[in-house]
Image: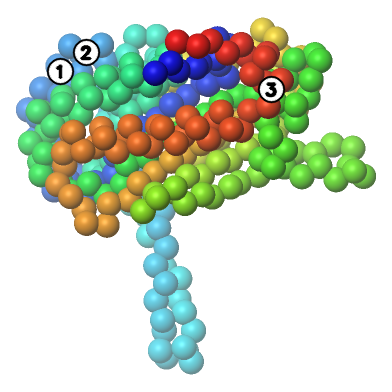
C-alpha cells in the first residue's frame, strides 16, 4: 500500500517513551553493567555518555483529622540518576532513569527507520541491564513535534485546521496562546494534541522550538534541532504542534520487546492519521506531498 509523506516536513523532534516499574538499584545497574552498556551503545553509534540527574516533584494529599477534616499537601522531591547516550551530530539520544527509557531523535526520515532504531535500543539495554528484562511495563508513548513556520503569503491559521488553533477574538490586535485537545483512541489509550501559537523574538525569529516540558535542563544532553526556516517570513507568529499518543497497561505485563514494538506501531498509525487530518490544503501544497 502506498504511503504519503511531506518533502518539506515541519517535523523536528520525535520521542518514544517506555515507562516501567522501578529498577531495584538507584544507580540503574552495577558498575560493570553500565560499562558494558556504554560499550554496546558505542557499537550502535551512541558514543557520548552523560551522567546526569533528573528531579521529579510529586504532591501527596493527607487528611489532617486534628483540623476539622482539612487536607494537608505534602510536596515530595526525588532526585534520580539519569544516564544519557548521544550520537554523532547530536541528532539521537537515549535516556535511562529508574523507571523510564526514552529514545529521541531530531533526524527523522520515516517511522520504519525510527522503529529499527528503537528496536536496537531495546535489545541493547535489556542485554546489559539484567533487571530490566524483569520489570513490568506500565505505559508506552510516542510523541511528535512539528514547527509551523508561515511563509510570506500565509499566516499560521492557513496551515492548521481552525479547531486546533488558539481563539482569535475579532477585537484583538495580537493573539498568542495554546489550544489542547484530548482524545480517547481505544481501551486505555489517549492522544493529546497541543497547538501553541508563539511570537518570535525581537530578532524576528523563533526563540523556542520545543514545548516547555521537552526543554532539556542539562545542556550536555541537548540535541541539535534543524527547523526548515528557509521559507519563513520573519516576524510572523509561528506554531509548535505536539501529538502525544500513549497506551497504559493496567495489567502491567512483563517487559516484552515484541509487545512493546507492536504497541508503538498502533500508536504511530493514529498519530500519523491525526497529523494529516490537522493539515489544510495550503500546508500540503507548500510542504509538497510525495507518494511512496
Q: Does dot 2 land on a helix, a strand or a loop?
A: loop
In the image, 264 versus 133, the foreground residue is 264
Tell me the number on the disc at residue 281. 3
Q: Secondary structure at mark 1?
A: helix
Q: Is residue 22 left or right of residue 142?
A: left
Q: Nearer the viewer, residue 115 or 47?
A: 115
Q: Position of residue 234 (x, y in %)?
A: 76, 16
Q: Position of residue 175 (x, y in %)?
A: 80, 39
**How much space separates mark 1 and mark 3, taking CA atoms?**
45 Å
16 and 53: which is toward the camera: 16
Mark 1 and mark 3 lie on one chain; the one further toward the N terminus is 1
Q: Quadrant of residue 154?
A: top right
Counting the numbered discs, the total is 3
- Mark drawn on residue 51: none
Question: Do labels 1 and 2 touch, CB within 8 Å?
Answer: yes
Q: Residue 237 location in percent, x, y?
A: 75, 27
- Quarter of the image for the C terminus: give it: top left
User: Disc 1 and disc 2: Cα gap in Å?
Assistant: 7 Å
Percent x, y of residue 291: 50, 11
Circle 3: element type = helix
Q: Residue at x 45, y 18 (%)?
A: 3
Is residue 259 depicted above or below 276 in this figure?
below
- The residue at 38%/21% (across/down) is 111
Q: CA distance from mark 3 to mark 2?
A: 40 Å
* 97 displayed left or right of 222: left
Graded by Cα atoms within 10 Å as few (under 14), some (14 to 19) or many (20 or more), the crowding at tag 3 reads few
Q: Which residue is mark 2?
A: 44
Q: Residue at x 63, y 37 (%)?
A: 195
Amino acid at each position: 500500500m502506498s504511503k504519503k509523506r511531506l518533502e518539506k516536513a515541519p517535523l523536528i523532534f520525535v520521542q518514544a517513551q517506555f515507562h516501567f516499574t522501578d529498577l531495584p538499584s538507584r544507580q540503574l545497574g552495577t558498575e560493570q553493567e553500565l560499562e558494558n552498556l556504554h560499550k554496546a551503545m558505542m557499537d550502535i553509534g551512541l558514543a557520548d555518555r552523560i551522567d546526569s540527574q533528573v528531579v521529579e516533584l510529586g504532591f501527596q494529599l493527607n487528611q489532617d483529622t486534628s483540623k476539622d477534616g482539612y487536607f494537608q499537601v505534602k510536596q515530595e522531591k526525588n532526585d534520580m540518576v539519569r544516564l544519557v547516550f548521544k550520537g554523532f551530530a547530536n541528532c539521537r539520544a537515549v535516556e535511562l532513569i529508574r523507571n523510564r527509557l526514552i529514545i529521541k531523535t531530531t533526524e527523522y526520515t520515516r517511522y520504519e527507520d525510527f522503529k529499527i532504531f528503537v528496536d536496537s535500543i531495546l535489545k541493547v539495554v535489556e542485554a546489559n541491564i539484567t533487571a530490566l528484562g524483569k520489570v513490568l511495563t506500565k505505559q508506552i508513548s510516542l510523541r511528535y513535534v512539528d514547527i509551523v513556520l508561515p511563509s510570506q503569503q500565509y499566516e499560521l491559521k492557513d496551515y492548521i485546521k481552525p479547531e486546533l488553533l488558539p481563539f482569535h477574538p475579532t477585537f484583538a490586535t495580537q493573539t498568542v496562546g495554546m489550544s489542547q485537545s484530548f482524545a480517547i483512541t481505544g481501551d486505555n489509550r489517549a492522544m493529546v494534541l497541543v497547538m501553541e501559537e508563539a511570537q518570535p523574538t525581537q530578532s524576528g525569529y523563533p526563540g523556542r522550538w520545543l514545548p516547555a516540558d521537552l526543554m532539556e535542563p542539562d545542556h550536555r544532553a541537548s540535541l541539535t534541532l534543524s527547523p526548515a526556516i528557509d521559507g519563513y517570513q520573519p516576524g510572523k507568529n509561528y506554531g509548535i504542534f505536539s501529538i502525544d499518543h500513549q497506551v497504559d497497561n493496567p495489567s502491567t505485563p512483563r517487559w516484552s520487546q515484541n509487545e512493546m514494538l507492536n504497541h508503538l506501531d498502533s500508536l504511530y498509525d493514529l498519530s500519523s492519521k491525526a497529523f494529516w487530518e490537522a493539515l489544510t490544503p495550503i500546508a500540503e501544497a507548500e510542504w509538497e506531498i510525495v507518494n511512496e
